[in-house]
Image (cartoon, rainbow, N blue to C red):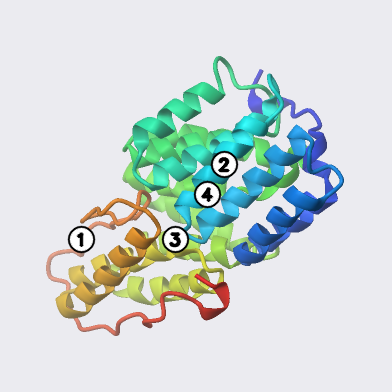
Amino acid sequence: MALHAQLPPCPMLSEPRLRDTQALLLSGDPRRAADRCAHLLGGAPHAGTPGWQAAFGALRAESLLCLGDAGWAEREAAAAVRAAPPGGALVLWPAAVLAQTLTETGRYEEADRQLRDAARGPLPSTAYALPYLRARGRHRLAVRRPAEALADFRRTGGGVNRPDAGLFLHLPWRTDAAEALLGLGRCRQAAELVREQLARTAVLGPRYRGVALRLLAATEEPARRPATLARAIVELRACADRPELARALADLGDCLHDLGDDFTAGGVLRRARHLAADCGAPPLPARVLPGTVRPARYRAGTSPRRLPAAPRDDRPAASGV
């Protein structure tokens, strides 16, 4: 049975406080989302139940990962995995967050083991499989298996389009798939998916808009990329997503280098690498974090020109990071 053919009800996904807290994350406030999760993990009437601990622990880990605190995200996700009810499907959610954290910090073999341990055999037809599929796709993308990643993202898209997908209705499978398509050299199809994602303005927060704009830049002519990446950087600063901000800065630095502005490019890339290192990512010269897109170099004959650097404030003061 295909994953999207049937998604049984998942009780925790209809918990109002979980939805309200996730809304903070989606709207670009990961700090408040993480703090509220911590409060609900310790003080709510149901805080001692395994399902509650696993679900709010997974959401807190997601929020911390957005803030660039990979160490705490890993600890919270691992605790949520341990808290999940034995033999249940809910474990797939915190396991997915843990695998994504390991992937973003360059620990690919550990991420692969986590993904294998969480799902031995066929994936169950449940909404909890959706974040797992996305995390597996992100891992496959990071280890340069874009065709397999694309298959996972398409399966995710088939599931999130159902009304019973719960909290996972807004998983950004289109931009994930677009990134895989870029890895396969299918730029036109990638651009179509990114534009579809950007058209969903009613449900897009600054984080998703920023990621979509960063990927849109990779499909554009070289001279247009800096302006699009500058828009992405504004959105990602607004939501305090430091790993994604590092990716956008890295793409801008590469773009400026390709356009011949090596002086400005060097400064932008240094800021990207410092930010990535501060988020716990390994120092990678070409790709600052797994997922950084390096577009094809500009065509021979394109005139390089000097372009303005991105604004320098890489840490929004309101975020506390």
Tag in front: 3 or 1 = 3
Other-residue count near label 4 (Cα within 10 Å), few / some / many at <14 / 14–19 / ≥20: many
| Residue type highlighted by circle 1 | Arg
**Which residue does the numbered mark 2 point to in the structure image?**
77
The secondary element bearing badge 2 is classed as helix
Q: Name the residue under label 4.
A: 73
Image marks 3 and 4: residues in contact by CB distance under 8 Å: no
In the picture, residue 253 is in which quadrant?
bottom left
Return the x and y of residue 237 as percentages of the image width and height: 49, 73
Residue 271 vertical position relative to residue 42 in the rendered view, above or below: below
Q: Earlier in the sequence, mark 3 or mark 4?
A: 4
On the image, the x and y values in percent for residue 107 come to 35, 39
Q: Between tags 4 and 1, which lies in front?
A: 4
- Contact between marks 3 and 1 (CB within 8 A): the answer is no
Q: Dot 2: few (<14), some (14–19), or many (≥20) neighbours within 10 Å?
A: many
Q: Earlier along the polypeptide chain: callout 1 or callout 2?
A: 2
Q: 114 above or below 97?
A: above
Camera-side residue of 29 and 78: 78
* Between discs 3 and 1, the one toward the N terminus: 3
State the separation of the CA atoms marked 4 and 2: 6 Å
Location of mark 3 (residue): 244
